[in-house]
Amino acid sequence: MTRLRSLIFMLWLYGSMAFYGIFCSPFMLLPLRYAMLPIRWWGHTVLFGARWIVGIKVEFRGLEHMPDQGALIAGKHLSMLDTIAPFTVLKLPAYVLKQELMYLPFLGWFAARTRMVPVRRDEAAKALKSMVAGCRARLKEGRQILIFPEGTRSDIGQDAAYKPGVAALYRDLEVPCHLLATNSGQFWPGHGIDRKPGTVVFEFLPPLPPGLKRAEFMAQLKERLETRSNALIAEQTAK
């Protein structure tokens, strides 16, 4: 039954993406705030399907720490859900994402129109410079820049390496770094199609202040994100 529900949900996930991509394509001709609406609607549609098809409820905590103006946010990355759910609560997000995603139908088209920040991971120094410039521009627009420091989805329990890109943004943008912990991979794994019933929590944590030394920043970032995400996993396991 879990596999069947998961397959139905996959149809819901990608079918709704195609639906909004096709029927809301005229929104790409509108100003940014309106062009972002179909992505937000799709996010809510995905969360609705997750709740009623596979039994995944999504809860947001720490909203008092969620920025509503230009900001840098670093998030734990365990699942595709981490890239979808924040669209439903952030005011005007701008994601740092892989260049390859820009070539996908619907997703890539809206990502380009809403000025997400693509990164070519095979061009190290050049990619870092381009990412910082792109994020600086988005910050001036009052966007909430969301980056996943691990660079890709990690598995629960994995000692994931945090990439230096987030430190470059933190240093050059000279803003606090907000943190977003989650247990998403517990019920929506980063690999495979099976989804399990449970509560996925996304929790905004108090931000790290600007001006920390690189090593201290990276150490605090990883320690706080990993500790809180592991605590959320333990909390849901105990239920």
Image (cartoon, helix red, strand yellow):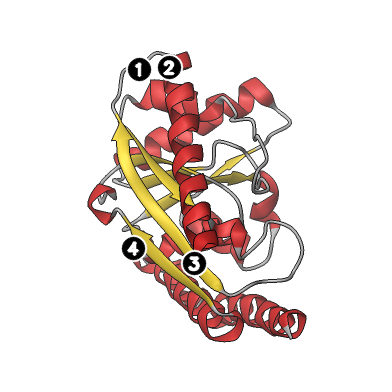
Q: Residue furthest front?
A: 238
Q: Nearer the viewer, mark 3 or mark 1?
A: 3
- Within 10 angstroms of label 2, few (less than 14), some, or many (20 or more) residues? few
Q: Is residue 91 above or below residue 156?
A: below
Q: Amino acid at mark 3?
A: Lys
Q: Nearer the viewer, mark 3 or mark 4?
A: 3
Q: CA distance from mark 3 to mark 4?
A: 40 Å
Q: In terms of image quadrants, where is residue 163?
A: top right
**As rendered, which of 196 and 216 lies closer to the eye?**
196
Q: Which residue is mark 1?
A: 212
Q: Amino acid at mark 1?
A: Leu
Q: Which residue is mark 2?
A: 216
Label 2 near label 3: C-beta < 8 Å? no
Q: In terms of image quadrants, where is residue 124?
A: top right
Q: Which residue is mark 4?
A: 33
Q: Position of residue 22 (x, y in %)?
A: 59, 79
- Within 10 angstroms of label 3, few (less than 14), some, or many (20 or more) residues? few
- Secondary structure of the residue carrying numbered label 4: helix
Label 1 near label 3: C-beta < 8 Å? no
